Amino acid sequence: MNEQTVARHWVAAALPKAAPAIATTTVLALARIWNANGAEHSVGNAVLMTVLSAGAAAAGVCASSHTGDSVLTGTAFAASGALAFAGVAGYADGLSLPLLLWSLATAGAYTLAARYWRHDRRETVSYERQTSERREEYAHIERVEALRAGAQIEVARTGAAYAEQLAQALVTRATLPGFDPTALERAGLPAIPAVDTSKEQ
């Protein structure tokens, strides 16, 4: 059961790294299928792919200048490159030029992807650092509050124990022979209530 979880995690981690190569390989395979089905030396198909590629590049320029959205711009330029690559790979009669373009496209895709991967990694590290700092701060506050509550409990226990011992001492003193509470009152000390010894016996 644990082995399946680890295998799934490994595949999930490796899939984004393989995505650029999978994308360029898929474009090459589709272009070669298109080549075998009549696109080889077809001027009309080459013109179509040129127009589509130029349109995607123009969309990338517009997105870059008007919106400034890097994801949209990158997607438009990637689509333009993929269309141009597919057009050349479909038009060419041999495999050498398509494979050369495939290697260049794959290298370019990894170069662009590495920039986004670094950016994502920086954001992830920054988020983990902030989360760790927040946890440490809250843990420190919890420790301080626990110490404060413990100190208050100990003070309350000490006060209760002192009051109990004082009451016990007063009761014990009141039962001693010759104890005169009125003499204490005459001396200006507070009166101690008399203890009914008959109830205790």
Image (cartoon, rainbow, N blue to C red):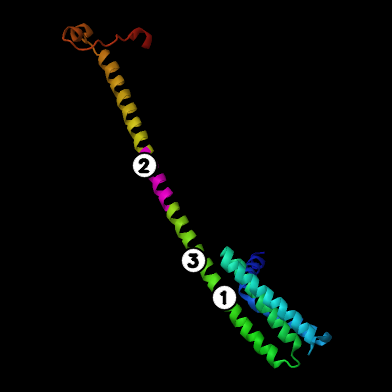
Q: What's the magenta bit mostly, secondary-structure-wise?
A: helix
Q: Which mark is residue 147?
A: 2
Q: What's the CA distance linking mark 3 and mark 2?
A: 38 Å
Q: Quadrant of residue 191?
A: top left
Identify residue for label 3. Answer: 122
Give the distance between the C-alpha atoms of the residues marked 1 and 2, in whole angstroms. Answer: 53 Å
Where in the figure is residue 76, as x and y percent of width and height?
64, 71
Q: Amino acid at mark 1?
A: Leu
Residue 39 image point, x, y percent = 80, 86
Residue 9's spot in the image, x, y percent? Answer: 62, 67
User: Is 159 drawn above or below residue 131 in the view shown?
Assistant: above
At horizontal 75% and vertical 82% (from top left) the residue drawn is: 47
Q: Secondary structure at mark 3?
A: helix
Q: Position of residue 14 (x, y in %)?
A: 62, 73
The tag earlier along the polypeptide, 3 or 2, is 3
Badge 1 marks a residue whose secondary structure is helix
Question: Which residues fall within the magenta stretch?
Answer: 136-148
Res 15 seen here: no
* Quarter that holds the C terminus: top left
Please name which of the two marks, 1 or 2, marks the residue nearer to the observer: 1
Q: Hey, what amino acid is under mark 3?
A: Arg
Give the image quarter of residue 102: bottom right
Q: Quick one: label 3, few (<14), some, or many (20+) residues within 10 Å?
A: few
Dot 1 corresponds to which residue? 112
Q: Which one is in front, 112 or 72?
A: 72
**Dot 2: what SS?**
helix
